[in-house]
Image (cartoon, rainbow, N blue to C red):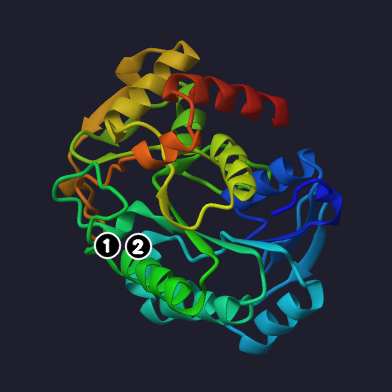
Amino acid sequence: MNLGDRESMKVLVTGGTGLLGYWIIYALRSRGFEVYATYHEKSPPQLDAKWIKLDLEDWENATSSVRMIKPDIIIHTAAYTDVDGCEIDKARAFKINYLGTSFLAKASKDVELFIYISTDYVFNGERGFYGEEDIPAPVNYYGLTKLLGEVAVKTLLNNSCIVRVSGLYGYSPTGKKNFGLIALEKLMRGEPVEAFTNQWLSPTYVKSLAETITMLIEKKHMGTLHIAGERLSRYEFATMLADALGVDRGLVKPKLMEAAKLVAKRPRDSSLNVSKARKLGLIIPPTSECLKDMILTYKEFM
């Protein structure tokens, strides 16, 4: 891939109003790429991109959008990510996460690289520290539909990279809530934060992930890749956040996942092995650094 003239290279980012999509657009524009971004229900944020309304449940809409833009790269971040919502409304989850991905992939056979953002929830969480070659076995419908999306991309395209991430957190002006942001706002108000002591994942800071995915374009890596932060329990993550804020870590209250009575089952340990990405130089900074940046970013926008 010749990246000598990035301004002539078109990148289409689906889900531009989402937590990750926002920062990917920001990172791409900072590097001089021509960016097209999609929105659906939310109005587009004030970012330097060409905005396209896209309904992933509409085959004709997805196809015509790709044909009109003729992107060199597609980064597919759009998804129905409400884990409990997917369990309740399985039809919607299936349409957006699987069928919508299939529609987009079918229309994208001429692009140079198709990056599909997947999830650690494709694994059952029985042992953790999952590598790219480990066999998925999702325990909830969200994980299943994202896995089906992976299968669609692999089946339909030869020019794809499936990027599995874990526990996305951070702030964006689009207002997308996540555990890290909710905990940050509560701790800043001096309110207690309940956090699971028996659920482990690899919390991944969206700003750093966006920068890493932009670097991935330049490497033109194909196949499956895990890009994520370090293995932590939700409780460990929240106490690190309290320390970064300089507030009493006693505000973080330990809780067992079983006591939450969640609609959808969660993996006990869905942490990811990122050694493959590390060898490629695609590294998420230490959580302590990411948390400091999240706090500064939040204060800048508020």
Residue at the image position 61 percent from the left and 38 percent from the top? 211
Q: Which residue is mark 2?
A: 84
Element under disc 1: loop
Residue 294 pos. (x, y %): 56, 28
Residue 274 pos. (x, y %): 36, 39
* Residue 152 horizontal side relative to residue 32, left or right: left
Give amino acid for label 2: Asp
Residue 113 pos. (x, y %): 61, 62
Q: Which residue is mark 1?
A: 263
Q: Quadrant of the N terminus?
A: bottom right
Marks 2 and 1 close (CB-CB < 8 Å): yes
Which one is in front, 21 or 247? 21
Q: Residue furthest bottom?
A: 60
Residue 157 visible in this rendered orientation of the protein: yes
Which one is in front, 115 or 79? 115
Element under disc 2: helix
